[in-house]
Amino acid sequence: MESPGYVRISTAAAMTLKLVPGKFNRGEKLGCLNLLIHYDEGCRANCSYCGLSGTRDAVTDDPSSDTFIRVDWPLVEIDDIIRRANEHAPHLQRVCVSMITHNKSFDDMISIMNKFKEETDLSISGLIAPTMMMDIDSAFKIKKAGADMIGVAIDAATPELFDEMRGSGVMGPHSWDHYWQVLDWCVDVFGKGMVGIHIIVGLGETEEEMISVIQKAQDKGAKTHLFSFFPEGGSSMSKWLQPSYGRYRRVQLARYIINEEISDMGQMKFDSEGQLIDFGININPIVNEGIAFMTSGCAGSDGMVACNRPYGNERPSNPIRNYAFIPEERDVKQIWSQIFDYTE
């Protein structure tokens, strides 16, 4: 049961397709099906924080040891996913097909995209593995298969952290320079604003370094899809702590300001430890609106984020980091209490 006939789907997708029981908090609805390419031999990369790492421990008595981005990803037949999406989930707006580092994954992603293009009305995104793409023609093939948006999971905010956690530091195949080259190809093919980078807050970077890479992507024509680090059981970073809510809120707000072109990093001020201490503009109306603190990802037909990933960054028992809905008054009050909290 491997791709392209089968893929792994997120727990939220499995709930939406009525494959597993469960309900979402506060009436949330999943806007995007996240599909993950799967092979029995797994991913050939060794990213130190990732639940798919080829060197991840087999901790069979730990239920968290078979997770990715915090949750289980059951293996499901593509035909069943499409049938259930058409029958049970009219609110879905998008499907995202995610590659892994494997020499078959690009062609299988294309095959899966073509199938969704032919058999559904969903918009299509691709979360690509740049290491498996050698030229700009790869981006044209993805667009021809029906994708209108692309995500590039750069993850680490600096070349040093990237190399330490994804490249030579873990004997991995990934290259910082190649990832950015592929990003440039994708912007050339899909257009500005139709490409996003994935970045994870909490891998050892400063806020200034994180906001710098957000600005870099923006200047190239790519938006930022922001994640908060969550320790995956069995990974080499399973004992790391998540970033504080204060740190994450400041980066979220800076990302929104930059991506919405309200202002830029040049107007912001940082202290000697790289912490953001002044946004350079009046943030009151932005914070009170709340949208800056929602999940950032590929949009749907209504212009709002479709890839809303409910509880992809925290357990339901914890305060929300990425809101899958517009924050309510009680949420905004809590956000205000977090933004300028510099305790770790």
Image (cartoon, rainbow, N blue to C red):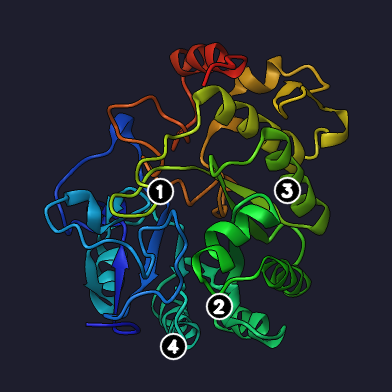
Q: Which mark is residue 104?
A: 4
Q: Is residue 255 above or below residue 1?
A: above
Q: Is residue 306 above or below residue 325?
A: below
Left/right placement of residue 332 relative to residue 63 reads: right
Q: Residues within 10 Å of mark 2 (few under 14, many from 20)?
A: many
Q: Earlier in the sequence, mark 3 or mark 2?
A: 2
Q: Earlier in the sequence, mark 3 or mark 1?
A: 3
Q: Earlier in the sequence, mark 4 or mark 3?
A: 4
Could you say which is closer to the camera, residue 184 or residue 275? 275
Q: Position of residue 224 (x, y in %)?
A: 65, 49
**Eye-nearest disc, 3 or 1:** 1
Q: Position of residue 20 (x, y in %)?
A: 15, 54
Q: Quadrant of residue 254?
A: top right
Q: Position of residue 277 (x, y in %)?
A: 74, 19
Q: Position of residue 135 (x, y in %)?
A: 70, 85
**Eye-nearest disc, 4 or 2:** 4
Q: Earlier in the sequence, mark 4 or mark 1?
A: 4
Q: Earlier in the sequence, mark 4 or mark 2?
A: 4
> Can residue 154 be seen from the camera position used here?
no
- Type of the residue with mark 4: Lys
Residue indicated by mark 1: 237
**Helix, strand or loop under label 2:** loop
Q: Residues within 10 Å of mark 4 (few under 14, many from 20)?
A: some
Using the numbered discs, state the Cα–Cα distance from disc 4 to disc 3 in whole angstroms: 30 Å
**Helix, strand or loop under label 4:** loop
Residue indicated by mark 3: 213
Left/right placement of residue 60 relative to residue 274 reads: left
Using the numbered discs, state the Cα–Cα distance from disc 4 to disc 1 in whole angstroms: 28 Å
Name the outermost residue toward the left.
61
Could you say which is closer to the camera, residue 264 or residue 307? 264
